[in-house]
């Protein structure tokens, strides 16, 4: 099948997590820290909380005003670090400009860093050690490729976007010994971007620009993974011009229903893994 069904794959992972949680009669906990009034963040958190409920993870929802101080936020993180019922902590980004995001992430207990953004977890990943927490979107993409039986070994993979949450950790995962992809990461200062993209056996778009990847940038038969989530006229669209690219790609993820559900499933699985590690299961 040409369409890579991320929703179906994510549902399977969620069923597995739910069954394991029930088997251990466990109650993992995931805490959300949300600052200010941001409709997009609000939607993401609501979706994550609903998913938690479905699999048997308790959610702890902490909402703070836009004017909250860094010290107050650090104190909240410390409280959640100490709370034994909490296995994962998420600080929903973006944060107001007076807050240092890096400082907050570094304050999260590394064992509860289910987003995989803590410098220790990022460092471990770069050193080839995947025993720490790994960022949910990149790990979700790896799982989606694996479960769709798409091998990356020896393939030319081009990632468009070099963000800390998608492009960089995804490049690290793909080039890891054992996965063995040949990875190129391109960004807004890359010359001949279209030509580089056209080399890709697997093209991954994480840009944040609707329909940026056109059919002119894709090799015949390439696998195309669309990470982008953009709202255009009230509709969700990816970074790939799906209608055109679908005609030449061998496989492609849709938006919605591609990478997005895999991100949430991976977050819940990370929370469950954290619970197991903290309870020596
Ligand atoms: P980001 O931090 O804004 O990074 C965007 C990247 O795209 C940057 O590296 C930027 O290059 C590059 N870029 C921007 N314009 C470009 C251009 N004209 N040509 C080439 N490269 C260009 O974004 P992000 O957080 O990685 O997110 C990317 C997209 O994925 C967004 O739509 C976001 O909503 C979505 N997303 C989806 C999920 C999911 O679960 N599906 C998860 C996370 C993010 P520079 O570095 O040079 O500026």
Image (cartoon, rainbow, N blue to C red):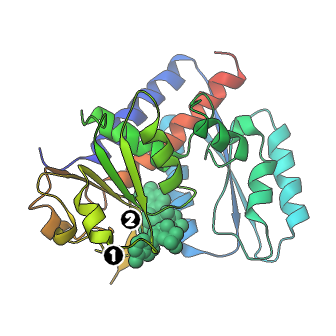
Q: For residue 51, say whether it is visible.
A: no
Q: Is residue 11 left or right of residue 3?
A: right
Image quadrant where residue 199 sits? bottom left
Residue picked out by circle 1:
210
Q: Residue at x 64, y 44 (%)?
A: 122
Categorize mark 1 by other alpha carbons within 10 Å: few (<14), some (14-19), many (20+). some
Image quadrant where residue 38 sits? bottom right
> Badges 1 and 2: C-beta atoms under 8 Å apart?
yes
Image quadrant in which the N terminus is located: top left
Q: Residue at x 55, y 46 (%)?
A: 135
- Residue 84 image position (x, y, % from top left): 79, 32
Mark on residue 253? none
Does 279 appear above or below 85? above
Judging depth in this view, the residue of 87 and 70 nearest the camera is 70
- Residue 278 image position (x, y, % from top left): 71, 24
Image quadrant where residue 62 sits? bottom right
Q: For residue 32, say whether it is visible.
A: yes
Does 149 appear above or below 241? above
Whether the residue under disc 2 has CB within 8 Å of ligand 1: yes
Q: Is residue 8 left or right of residue 191?
A: left
Judging depth in this view, the residue of 272 and 25 nearest the camera is 272
CA gap between label 1 and label 2 equals 7 Å
- Residue 5 image position (x, y, % from top left): 24, 47
Seen as rendered, the residue at the extreme bottom is 233
Seen as rendered, the residue at the extreme front is 191
Judging depth in this view, the residue of 144 and 47 nearest the camera is 144
Q: Is residue 281 left or right of residue 193?
A: right
Mark 1 lies on a secondary structure that is loop
Q: Residue at x 91, y 63 (%)?
A: 71
Mark on residue 228? 2
Q: Residue at x 53, y 40 (%)?
A: 268
């Amino acid at each position: 099948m040409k369409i890579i069904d991320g929703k179906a794959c994510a549902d399977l992972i969620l069923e597995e997590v739910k069954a394991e949680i029930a088997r251990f009669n466990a109650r993992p906990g995931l805490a959300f820290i949300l600052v200010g009034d941001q409709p997009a963040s609000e939607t993401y958190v609501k979706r994550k909380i609903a998913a938690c409920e479905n699999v048997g993870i308790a959610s702890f929802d902490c909402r703070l005003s836009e004017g909250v101080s860094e010290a107050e936020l650090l104190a909240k993180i410390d409280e959640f670090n100490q709370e034994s019922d909490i296995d994962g902590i998420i600080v929903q980004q973006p944060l107001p400009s007076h807050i240092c995001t890096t400082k907050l992430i570094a304050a999260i207990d590394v064992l509860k860093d289910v987003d995989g953004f803590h410098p220790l977890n990022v460092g471990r990943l770069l050193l080839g050690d995947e025993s720490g927490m790994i960022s949910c979107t990149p790990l979700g993409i790896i799982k989606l490729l694996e479960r769709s039986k798409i091998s990356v070994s020896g393939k030319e993979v081009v990632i468009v976007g070099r963000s800390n949450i998608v492009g960089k950790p995804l490049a690290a995962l793909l080039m890891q010994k054992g996965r063995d992809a040949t990875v190129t990461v391109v960004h807004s200062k890359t010359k001949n971007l279209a030509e580089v993209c056209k080399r890709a056996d697997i093209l991954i778009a994480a840009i944040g620009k609707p329909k940026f990847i056109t059919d002119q940038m894709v090799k015949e038969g390439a696998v195309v993974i669309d990470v982008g989530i953009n709202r255009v006229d009230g509709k969700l669209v990816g970074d790939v011009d799906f209608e055109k690219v679908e005609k030449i790609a061998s496989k492609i993820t849709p938006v919605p229903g591609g990478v997005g559900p895999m991100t949430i499933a991976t977050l819940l699985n990370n929370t469950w893994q954290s619970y197991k590690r903290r309870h020596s299961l």
